[in-house]
Image (spheres, rainbow, N blue to C red):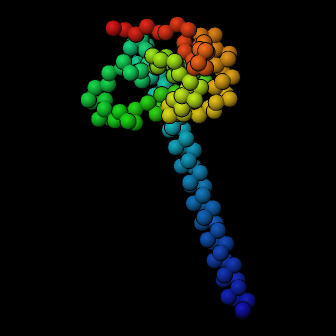
Amino acid sequence: MPQNHQETSQSRVLHELAREEQALDAAFEALKLAQSEVEMAARKYAAVRSLATDILGYSPYHDDAVWGAEESKIVPAERRGRYRFLQMKPREAILEALAEQDADISLKDIEERLKTGGLDLGSRAINAALMRLSGVEKTSQGTYRLKVRRSRAA
């Protein structure tokens, strides 16, 4: 291979590498921007969720909460609540998951509710938290419930 051809190949590959490095810089910058947008959206969501809970007197994801047709156009019922535990501490999320249920709930069901609500803790972490929560009791069937159910507005 002539030396001129080798220099051209090396120059071309280094030029291409530099372009890809530039593209990667742009992608990482876009990722940082997207991450900050997600963080802002999550915090806004958490604030509005908290306000809705305060106004309703119970979780907006409890079966008693009535979502109208307009809200269902924005977020269909089958997709609603997939972020409901976002920005919550594990302890708060577990209490909320229990409060959303009128029946006793198993550890596996608590784990599944948290996971489908945007918080994937795993059963060991949930079990450890349940053991430390004073407002929760374990039944003889091995399920969990709040010692005192929250009252809901009529």
Q: Is residue 13 left or right of residue 77?
A: right
- From the image, which quarter does the C terminus lie in? top left
* Spot occupied by residue 73 in the image (x, y as percentages of width and height): 29, 35
Relative to 7, does residue 81 appear above or below in the rendering?
A: above
- From the image, which quarter does the N terminus lie in? bottom right
Q: In this view, which residue lies farthest toward the bottom?
A: 2
Q: Splitting the image into 4 quarters, where does residue 112 fall?
A: top right
Relative to 11, does residue 67 appear above or below in the rendering?
A: above
Q: Is residue 118 left or right of residue 13?
A: left
* Spot occupied by residue 49 in the image (x, y as percentages of width and height): 44, 22
Residue depicted at x 42% and y 24%: 61
Q: In this view, which residue lies farthest toward the front?
A: 141
> Is residue 15 shown to the viewer in this render?
yes
Residue depicted at x 53% and y 22%: 105
Q: Is residue 10 left or right of residue 66?
A: right
Relative to 84, does residue 101 appear above or below in the rendering?
A: above
Residue depicted at x 64% and y 68%: 17
* Spot occupied by residue 113 in the image (x, y as percentages of width and height): 51, 29
Q: What is the number of callouts on the image?
A: 0
Q: Splitting the image into 4 quarters, where does residue 11 fall?
A: bottom right
Relative to 121, does residue 135 appear above or below in the rendering?
A: above
* Spot occupied by residue 51 in the image (x, y as percentages of width and height): 43, 17
> Is residue 92 shown to the viewer in this render?
no
Viewer-nearest residue: 80 or 21: 80
Residue depicted at x 36% and y 20%: 65
